[in-house]
Image (tube, rainbow, N blue to C red):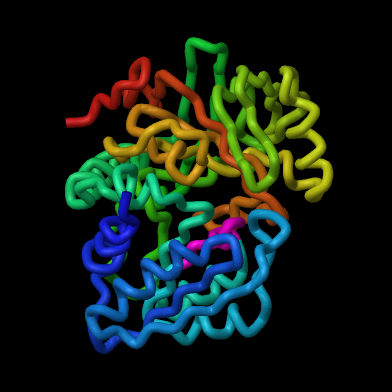
Amino acid sequence: MSMMKGARIAVETCMKIKSEETVLVVTDTKMLKVAEALACSAASIGAKTVVMIMEPTRRHGDEPPKPVAEAMKAADVVLVPTYMSLSHTDARRNATNQGARIASMPSITEHMMSVGGLTADYKKVASLTDKVATLVQKGSAVTISTPSGTILTMSIKERQPMRDTGLFHKRGDFGNLPAGEVALAPVEGSTSGTLVIDSLVDTALGLSVTQPLKVAVKDGRARSLVGPDAAKLKSILEAADKNAYNIAELGIGTNPKARLIGNVLEDEKVLGTVHIAVGDNTSFTGGHTRSNIHLDGILLQPTVKIDKRLLMQNGKLLVK
């Protein structure tokens, strides 16, 4: 399987890189092959392409070295195939504010780039994402339930959703590749009920939730964790900081090519799924809770109501 298929889609379709632009590929020693494919694709259309290689950060959300952060602010386009995610970092946010178009690709694999989520028709992904986001944006209250036991309510009043369309063509655009989700930060303190995580696999952290993990949620925070993998998840959250238990994100997958493969970068984009994250939410409009961590748990076959409107039923999006 060739990674160049996905690399070309990323460079030519998703980022729409031009020959006169400066492209920075930020990578680490565990992701060199992916970085090489992206850099070669960017260079092949004449873009001024620079690759910066660092040691992998310790965990998602850790800041990169200062020279990397400064270089990110100076580039037109930043491609970030790293082992640990730089999405929820000041380095990424500052570069976005400077106008860089950024695609974050933590632990992206050859499978994703050759036959998986990165090979989607991103015009169709963008269209569906925009339709879902428009409905979410009008809402105030969300109710989520799943066959495995989730019954969760939250306020999204005046929270603007992020539209991860996969088409990052304007100054300051940011998202994941593979893309395909609508995401926002619920109002702090508003999420309550029972959250049952069906899947949460993060090989970088050695975490693999393979059986439903029950989380009691009250006043916007995870209060208790029950299940075979609960102890491992709790140890990771405890090692981060006190805000690691914050309910940080509601995300809705919109990529029909994405599959549940045990890699959160693609898992959270799967059409017909919802994900709930804990930890940092400051990358979302209105979010103001900082944490050293951001972890996404996948919910399967969800039913989602926005106010009184049924948005999703048993994993089927009801969007025309």
The residue positioned 61% from the left and 31% from the top of the image is: 191
Vertical relation: 84 (above or below) 230: below
**Magenta segment includes 320:** no
- Residue 27 in the image: state x and y as whole percent: 54, 69
Q: Nearer the viewer, residue 24 or 126?
A: 24
**Res 42 quadrant in image:** bottom left
Residue range (magenta):
80-88
**Res 215 quadrant in image:** top right
The residue positioned 29% from the left and 26% from the top of the image is: 317
Vertical relation: 246 (above or below) 29: above
The residue positioned 25% from the left and 60% from the top of the image is: 9
Name the chief secondary structure element in magenta. loop
- Position of the C terminus, as image quadrant, is top left
In the visual, does 145 lie left or right of 217? left
The residue positioned 47% from the left and 60% from the top of the image is: 104
- Residue 261 in the image: state x and y as whole percent: 45, 34
**Number of numbered discs visible in the structure rendering:** 0
In the visual, does 30 lie left or right of 77? right
